[in-house]
Image (cartoon, rainbow, N blue to C red):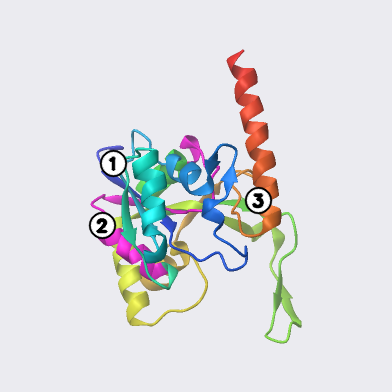
């Protein structure tokens, strides 16, 4: 419960990890799998329920890791082929007035980040994390010729978690499914396109990385070591 609203979290873990080459959710970072480390980020006193979307083939092993072994108070929901279809299945299992949606392979979000994006959504109906781009982003055509550039001062790199008023997600998913939407995007894009709602973007954190490649995994392990050492120094 936060500000008299009930809050649900959906952690999307139904992907196949094609670019990584194997199931990155089952890789260890520190002493936990990426899966468990990420899901634990949402076991917060202002999150009323946590739903984890999973593929049918991974349901049993994820259940063992999260529920049988770790004893986490979460529910697993079988997803679908497309990301927004999986998220729709997750949404149907929730009951919150506001819904926080997160990539299962971003294991370093913090309570402050979750709280800040949720509060921004409560104020603006829709919000997401991001960081201003430090590089110039080029627009290219199908033949990889440059067609333009995005102005750096107005270019941000998106992150999750993203948070939304429940009705917006319901409408966006339903319209995307009816429209046979197939672009690679996120929930903020869907809400903006199908609901006409402007999504507030607020500062995330450089450590809030998405593990997509083996190189990202190496960076994640460095971040984990640094955070562990910082925590140890803080305790002494």
Query: Badge 1, how many Cα within 10 Å: few under 14, some, many 20+?
Result: some
| Residue designated by label 3 | 217
Mark 3 lies on a secondary structure that is helix
Q: Nearer the viewer, residue 216 or 209?
A: 216
**Range of magenta residues:** 84-113
> Earlier along the polypeptide chain: callout 3 or callout 2?
2
Looking at the image, is 208 positioned above or below residue 44? below
Q: Is residue 199 magenta?
A: no
Question: Residue at position x 32%, y 45% from top?
Answer: 74
Q: How far from the left and from the top, in percent, is residue 47?
A: 33, 40
Q: Is residue 99 magenta?
A: yes
Per the rendering, the mark at residue 48 is 1
Query: Badge 2, how many Cα within 10 Å: few under 14, some, many 20+?
Result: some
Mark 2 lies on a secondary structure that is loop
Toward the bottom, the furthest residue is 143
| Residue designated by label 2 | 93
In the figure, residue 145 lies in which quadrant? bottom right
Q: Quadrant of the C terminus?
A: top right
Q: Is residue 230 left or right of residue 56?
A: right
> Earlier along the polypeptide chain: callout 2 or callout 1?
1
Q: Nearer the viewer, residue 13 or 161?
A: 13
């Amino acid at each position: 419960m936060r500000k008299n609203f009930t809050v649900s979290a959906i952690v999307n873990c139904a992907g196949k990890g094609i670019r990584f080459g194997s199931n990155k959710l089952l890789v260890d970072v520190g002493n936990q799998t990426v899966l468990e480390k990420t899901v634990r980020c949402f076991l917060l006193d202002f999150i009323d329920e946590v739903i984890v979307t999973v593929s049918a083939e991974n349901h049993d092993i994820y259940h063992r890791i999260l529920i049988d072994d770790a004893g986490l108070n979460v529910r697993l929901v079988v997803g679908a082929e497309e990301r927004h279809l999986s998220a729709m299945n997750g949404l149907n299992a929730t009951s919150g007035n506001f819904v926080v949606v997160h990539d299962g392979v971003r294991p370093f979000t913090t309570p402050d980040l979750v709280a800040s994006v949720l509060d921004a959504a409560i104020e603006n109906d829709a919000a997401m994390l991001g960081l201003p781009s430090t590089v110039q982003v080029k627009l290219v055509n199908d033949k990889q010729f440059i067609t333009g550039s995005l102005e750096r001062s107005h270019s941000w790199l998106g992150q999750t978690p993203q948070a939304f008023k429940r009705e917006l997600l319901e409408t966006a998913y339903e319209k995307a499914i009816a429209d046979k939407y197939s672009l690679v995007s996120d929930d903020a894009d869907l809400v903006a396109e199908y609901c006409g709602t402007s999504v507030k973007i607020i500062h995330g954190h450089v450590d809030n990385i998405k593990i997509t490649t083996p190189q990202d995994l190496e960076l994640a392990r460095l971040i984990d070591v640094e955070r562990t050492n910082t925590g140890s120094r803080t305790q002494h």
